[in-house]
Image: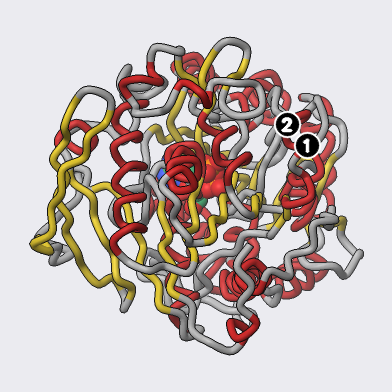
Amino acid sequence: MVKNPGVKASKMKILFASAELFPFSKSGGLADMASALPRAFRKRGQEVTAVTPLYSSIDIAKYDIRKSGVSFRLRIGAKIYEVELSHCKYEGLDVLFVYTPILCDREYLYGPPGGSYPDNDLRFAIFCHALVELLRRENYDLCHLNDWHTALAALLAKEAGVQSRIVYTIHNLAYQGIFPPSSLQRCGIDARHFTPEEMEFYGQVNWMKAGIGFADAVTTVSPSYAREILTPEFGCGLDGYLRRHSAKLRGILNGIESALYDPKTDPALPVHFGVDNFAGKAQCKALLCQDFNLEDSARPLVVFIGRFVAQKGLEWIVEALDALAALPANFIFLGEGEERYHAALEAAALRCGNLRCFFGYDEALSHRLYSGADLLLMPSRFEPCGLNQMIAMRYGTLPVVHAVGGLRDTVHPIGSRVCGEGFPFEDGNACGLIAAVENALVFSADPKKLEAVRRFDMGCDFSIDRCAGEYLHLYRELLSGSLSTKGEL
Ligand code: ADP
């Protein structure tokens, strides 16, 4: 480890790599974090470049993305791939785009809904080799890699003798990038890495293992999730491997962009509001009920926003739908995902007059739901961090959450006076969910108590700026060689 005691005060040169980056591409919370965190670093005086693929869905004209004039050829396996770089400034942040046809010229980021492209290994291998090329060409102090799509770059960088320190963040351990052994050669991975200590995983190649094994520090997006993934229940088969590397594992709670989610200024809202004036929130709710043709807008409005997948508790939701709809409340579900959940929700919406669904991805609608709702439903089976609950609290919407991972770290029982307050439940099943919603509805019936909790939650600091401070602290520890190897979990 290169020790550099002068690093504490000096500016760091950081390359921040991610397969998605808001507003250019987004499938979930990774895109939000990959956009907000580097911008927060920049505001704190760091020299940072974000790097991401130039997918064909990105509006080049809108963001003034221009070719940088740099291109290079990569030899990966037996083939040569031409890579071209483009660049733009997004809110002051330097964003570098990697273009190569196989990676970028696709209708979807990773594959059609519910599926993935069969050559995702090669697509993201090219991206990872391109990242290492960038690290070789410029002297970055540190490279921050995110999720399985960039994990291979940790191994390739070490193999290439790159000096930059490598931080690898696990946003979701459930997606590990697992491919057959035949993919080693075409992805340019030396077969000597196909061992249980490195990338081999039950006879397959596992990219996540390369990130965990070869990075100088591994982080995940909440302290509770960092502890959970060391157990067989949440470790997705990697708990043993993570335990072996736990000395360099940290849990750093994600944050949200306060300016983007501000009920006083949010352009997506029909009426604005703040802690001193909740009239606007009531109007937002009334307008939503009107648009969704929901009667009795005085009833509490409960919303769900997110991917319709098992992780988000859809199994429990589907089982609980009729019991929930029998409660004195209105419900709106926004999201997209697996067909069976679409079908169950659609059928419930036909049966129940107080339940509506909107299938699709709609950023503006999500903001209107956060603002107009009384309660946000988030019964995730597991949740690395979760952004929805933090966003909801910014809009005075109380979260009803399964107490796991980041949800446990951000939503505490009413009266605990710990940021924030809502309705966490321990029993991970449909009954636990129904009981928690019932409990939340009883509480919400008292407008004075409800308003007090809303005020409290809206004043909590879930900002990305706090999160950025913690990452910079970790970077400095790494660069000065003072990262404690005892682990802090
Ligand atoms: P994930 O596991 O999907 O990354 P997070 O809670 O970390 O979940 O982040 C989800 C982000 O995506 C939030 O900003 C949420 O508002 C947004 N989101 C999810 N689904 C939708 C949708 N259908 N329409 C609009 N926004 C959505």
Provide the secondary structure element on which disc 1 rests: helix
Question: Looking at the figure, which quarter contains the N terminus?
Answer: bottom right
Callouts 2 and 1 close, C-beta under 8 Å: yes
**Up-down relation of residue 421 to residue 351 (above or below):** below
Going 34% across and 28% down the picture, which residue do you hit?
Answer: 188
Provide the secondary structure element on which disc 2 rests: helix
Where in the figure is residue 51, as x and y percent of width and height?
33, 57
**Where is mark 2, residue-wise?**
241
Q: Residue placed farthest to the bottom in the image?
A: 9
Q: Quadrant of residue 196?
A: top right
Q: Amino acid at mark 1?
A: Arg
Q: How is the image coloured?
A: secondary structure
Q: Amino acid at mark 2?
A: Tyr
Where in the figure is residue 264, as x and y percent of width and height?
49, 78
Q: Indicate which disc residue 113 carries.
A: none
Going 31% across and 75% down the picture, which residue do you hit?
Answer: 91
**Where is mark 1, residue-wise?**
244
Q: Is residue 34 left or right of residue 119?
A: right
